[in-house]
Amino acid sequence: MKSASLQVYAVTTRCYLQGKSLYEAVKEAIAGGATFIQLREKDGPTISKAALLEEIAHIKTLCHKHDVPFVIDDDVALAMETDVDGVHVGQEDMNCQDVRKLIGPHKILGVSAQTVEQAIAAEKQGADYLGVGAVFPTNSKDDAQDVSRQMLIDICEAVSIPVIAIGGITHDNVRALKGTGIVGVAVISEIFKASDITKATQTLSQAVHKMLSDVPTALTIAGSDASGGAGIQADLKTMITNHVYGMSAITALTAQNTLGVKSVMNVTPDFLRDELDAIFTDIYPEAVKIGMVSESALIHVIKECLIHYQAKHIVLDPVMVATSGAKLISDDAMNVLQEELIPLAEVITPNIPEAEILSGLSISNAQEMEAAAQAIYERYHTAVLLKGGHAINDANDLLYDGDIVWFKGQRIDNPNTHGTGCTLSSAIAAHLAKGETLTSAIAKAKQYLSDALAAQLDLGHGSGPLNHDFKEMPYDK
Ligand SMILES: Cc1ncc(COP(=O)(O)OP(=O)(O)O)c(N)n1
Ligand SMILES: Cc1ncsc1CCOP(=O)(O)O
Ligand SMILES: [Mg+2]
């Protein structure tokens, strides 16, 4: 079974047939682009066993003619008796491992999962795909459990088998599932409740294709690093490797390498405005990361544009000093950044020295980190991710958003840390663009940063860049 056959998965019901046969309804769904059929005999009128067997045989022939897989919900014995392509079982039905034994290795086994643990277990026990839901409120299953978008994302990331979403999905709301990692959707009412089943399936199919082909988008507003390890270059590498389409509005060109910054050339405010207009009026970013901005006039432009275009999910890395020690912002701009940009952000990501400047407090231990983060939060009403660093506590970071959440860091022995702040903040933006919660986005961004550090890339004569593409390990010797 190919993942593509799961794109528009139609689950039958006899509730809305109004004189039509189920065979006719399925035929219309396939004509409209249904790619998978599941017979679900749960609600609506029942028919005799003989009539059911005859109907299943007809539907099976129809499905095979169109190369559409046909499975039966719950009733493993019926699926075997009728020799359809497989079965779909839920957590309350027959054990997945037992079903696999009964149906053999070649039949399709679909399993419902509502948690990561259930998903991993089903994959281990031989499931070919997972149905996850209900992702929206549904009238078609009384005992359906709600599954959050974050849970759907986590399940998709936890397993290698394809995942489809189910529950209350329509052509209107399907785009909200973009970026979750699903390969398709399963529906009952959106197809079978329609008076024109073919048209409804076509409309849904188009919406599903658009949702699957659209990638999440994010923007970095930052400086260019000629040596490619920090700034927009690090941000764009981070976004693409986290499966997000990245765009950049460059605030400055920096001539720098792993040893330090030689010179900086800011763009003009008018040029920055042109960049932001070009981006926001064409490919709207679902999250925005802001890095180095060293002049007040540029900060004014960013503020105006972010408000004008109602930018969402703004992650601000208050870049003040480069890892090499070079100062990257004027004193005047530092004040404007605090007053104009920090209040617009969903989260800011200062390191210890930056948090000391923002809070006016000195920080030398975890308790003082908590006090400083709280002070910054209370001043700007913006969540603060205060990055710990080895000097204080083994790179444990603290999120303060009214509550305290600690994110434990892994100690990684690697002197090459050029661009770590840029990478963390743009990875957070990338995960927010996918619709993840702030805490999940931070946890995943931290893991990404740890993995990129652990890949031990060693370039340049100073503090070198990370391996943003560590998954492929192209530099492994
Ligand atoms: C594709 C798909 N996903 C989930 C379900 C639900 O299965 P289950 O939880 O066993 O509930 P019932 O459908 O049996 O009531 C499904 N049928 N199909
Ligand atoms: C079978 C099932 N499992 C979880 S929700 C659901 C019902 C889906 O039906 P609809 O598409 O009409 O909401
Ligand atoms: Mg079931």
Image (spheres, helix red, strand yellow):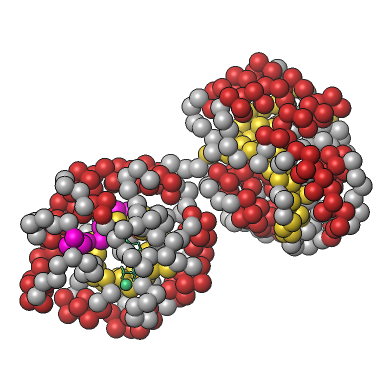
Left of 115 or right of it: where is 5?
A: left
In the picture, the quarter occupied by the N terminus is bottom left
Residue 216 at x, y = what percent?
50, 42
Does the magenta portion include 136?
A: no
Q: Residue furthest top?
A: 270
In this rendering, the count of numbered labels is 0
Residue at left offset 66%, top offset 15%: 270
Residue 228, located in which quarter of the rendered image? top right
Q: Quadrant of residue 329?
A: top right
Boundaries of the magenta span: 7-15
Q: Which quarter shows the C terminus? A: bottom right
Q: Tell me if residue 368 comes above or below residue 332 in the rendering.
A: below
Asked whether 126 or 42 is in front, the reply is 42
Please say if 411 is above or below 105. Answer: above
Please state the horizontal and vertical placement of residue 26, each as a whole percent of the image. Answer: 16, 57
Image-based side of 365 in relation to 452, left or right? right
Ligand 3 quadrant in view:
bottom left
Q: Position of residue 203 (x, y in %)?
A: 26, 42
Q: In this orientation, which residue lies closer to the viewer: 104 or 88?
A: 88
Q: Name the residue nearer the viewer: 110 or 175.
A: 175
The answer to if 14 sits in the magenta stretch is yes
In this rendering, position of residue 200 left or right of residue 50: right
Q: Is residue 62 visible?
A: no
Q: Residue at x 47, y 75 (%)?
A: 121
Identity of the residue drawn at 80% across and 48% down: 374
- Please tell me which residue is depicted at 85% across the width and 42% down the height of the picture: 359
The percent position of residue 91, horizontal first and vertical second, equals 39, 75
Residue 171 is at least partly visible in this image: yes
